[in-house]
Image: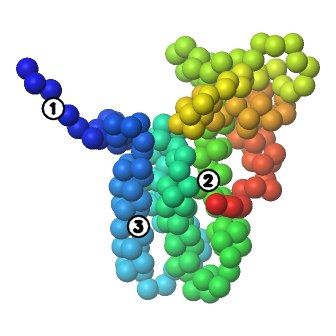
Amino acid sequence: MTLDTSNAEKDLGVTVDNELKFSKHIETQVAKANKILGLIRRSFQHLDIETMRSLYTSLVRPHLEYANVVWSPRLIKDIKLIENVQRRATKIIPGMKDKDYAARLKEFKIPSMNYRRERGDMIEVYKYTHDFYDTPLLLTRDNGNRTRGHSLKMKKNRWETTLRQKFFSERIVDSWNSLPENVINAASLNGFKNGLDLKWNEKRFIFNQ
């Protein structure tokens, strides 16, 4: 029996290539999101911010976020590609084009895509560390005797390749370890989300890439 070779494969809706990169997946999802955004633009003669936010968050943004804990972009070009969909969405409303991106995000009351991915990572870490999943912990706890930081710190490993550094188990370490004790040990998931948003409030509308 001869096995065929393939440069990329799709599994559970996520496309990964033979170099463990997700650029093809990102390009596909961005194309879908832009197509829907174009349909919205052509289908409505008049849109206000509230209506556009509802349409965008329910019909467009899910294509840019499905399973992004797995394929979270590491290349600047991919990060910009995703963020540019939201940039275009926030320009559709008349009078918004002349405002900078941060101002548009504040008026739409939506954070940057970059922020949402990092926030999503933190939510998954909270779930892993608070037994939401009946699976072995994929993260390495820092069991050292350091007094600084909170009680659920993760170990910082050293890797030579950028690819390995961007794996979920590695990229979350600095952000998670920097959170205060009252946030990481919130009594509920909603309590954690609220505490995280309050802690990170200043960077919700910032995108520096």
- Please determine whether, in this image, residue 44 is positioned above or below residue 157: below
Report the side of 17 relative to 199 (left or right).
Answer: left
Report the side of 52 relative to 143 (left or right).
Answer: left
Residue 35 screen position, x and y as percent: 36, 67
Question: What is the distance, in whole Å, between disc 3 and disc 2 at their CAs?
Answer: 18 Å
Residue at figure coordinates x 36%, y 50% from the top left: 24
Report the side of 52 relative to 19 (left or right).
Answer: right
Residue 190 screen position, x and y as percent: 69, 38
Q: Amino acid at mark 1?
A: Asp
Which dot marks residue 34?
Answer: 3
Residues at discs 3 and 1 in contact (Cβ within 8 Å):
no
Residue sticking out furthest to the front:
160
In what quadrant of the picture does the C terminus appear?
A: bottom right
Where is mark 2, residue-wise?
114
Comparing labels 1 and 2, the label whose residue is closer to the camera: 1
Residue at figure coordinates x 37%, y 80% from the top left: 42
Residues at discs 3 and 2 in contact (Cβ within 8 Å):
no
Work out whether residue 194 can be spotted: yes
Q: Secondary structure at mark 2?
A: helix
Where is mark 1, residue-wise?
4
